[in-house]
Amino acid sequence: MAELKDSYGRRISYLRISVTDKCNLRCRYCVSGKEFVLKKREEILSLEESERIARVGAALGINKIRFTGGEPLLRKGIDYLVEKISATPGISDLSLTTNGTLLKEYAARLREAGLKRINISLDTLNPARFEKMTRTRLWPQVMTGIEEALIRFDKVKLNVVAIRGTNDHEILDFVKFTRDKPIALRFIEFMPIGDNGWKPGQFISSSFVRSRIEREHELRKISQLSRSDSAELYQIEGFEGTLGFISAISQGFCENCNRLRLTADGFLKPCLSSDVEIDIKSKMRSGANDNELAELFIKALALKPREHNLLGEDGTKRRMFQIGG
Ligand code: SAM
């Protein structure tokens, strides 16, 4: 089987494909107050172009793909793309990250199309706070979406970005939410990305969140950080769900990094925190063959840094909805 390795010997097998920069939420920490311009339609990769890039990646050793955005369920034909890529030789794991608002409509179709796993992002269990945080009233739709995902998928993850002064007092409510639901809950450290207004005072480390939970519950570690999961996993006796902590800032997991990103406007991005990007769209649109596109994957790997630079000065200018998370 083909293998892609970067300059540090890490095997790269995971591609995150962003299919749109549009989102129906306006989360304050992601879409910050400053002006932004969405990409024009012709700047966004067509479904066929995304599929082709995935196919080229699969031939090189990519076996895992995640769709993201923006909100990927806003992209017309996402189920078609899932179906096409799930039939691509070499792809064994297909997942999608969504804000959940459209899952009632899409979960069954996505499952049928071949999607294996779903990650839902939700940062508050309080509808009024949701409105404040996302500038929308779509909280009930997310809750319905979670229920639907639990019916249609065996594996549902719920991602919570913990932010001091915003949702930190809900940590135990989220834990309680997984008592009778087979949800893999994951607390994510809040990262400074693309001038999103991140302030050190808003940051809560995973170890803080964990110790808050440990005041009420005994946690049993069930897995370490690994190449296949960037979260450490824990279980609470009697709970259906599991708990995980994604600690990009306090712990980092770059030595296990196995991923590349493809932005919706067609750039291969070797690292979330850096603006180094490879323009695969222009090359493809100027008639490149698959071998030439494969060379761009190799080039992207050569530019993959050893570690992220999330707290440094020369971070990415793109905001998270323009990368895909
Ligand atoms: N719309 C989809 C969703 O909500 O999951 C996919 C795109 S969204 C940008 C992907 C993930 O990035 C979400 O879980 C979101 O909470 C997370 N995210 C956005 N900005 C972040 C930040 N500054 N730090 C940590 N996570 C962030």
Image (cartoon, rainbow, N blue to C red):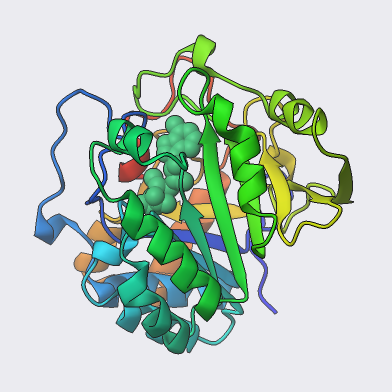
- Asked whether, in this view, residue 204 is left or right of residue 163, the answer is right
What residue occupies the far top of the structure in this picture?
201
Residue at image location 51% in from the left, 41% down from the top: 271
- Asked whether, in this view, residue 170 is left or right of residue 18, the answer is right
> In which of the image's four quarters is ligand 1 placed?
top left
In terms of image quadrants, where is residue 11?
A: bottom right
In terms of image quadrants, where is residue 143?
A: bottom left
- Establish if 171 lies above or below 83: above
Residue at image location 29% in from the left, 56% down from the top: 264
Q: In this rendered view, identify the residue nearer to me: 154 or 82.
A: 154
Residue at image location 80% in from the left, 33% down from the top: 216
Can residue 91 be seen here?
yes
> Where's residue 288, x and y in %?
29, 70
Q: In this rendered view, identify the residue nearer to me: 296 or 73.
A: 73
> Where's residue 1, x and y in %?
70, 79
> Where's residue 272, x and y in %?
48, 39
> Where's residue 175, x and y in %?
66, 44
- Asked whether, in this view, residue 97 is left or right of residue 247, the answer is left
* Numbered-mark total: 0
Residue at image location 44% in from the left, 89% down from the top: 112
Q: In this rendered view, identify the residue nearer to me: 9 or 318.
A: 318
Can residue 61 be seen here?
no
- Asked whether, in this view, residue 230 is left or right of residue 32, the answer is right
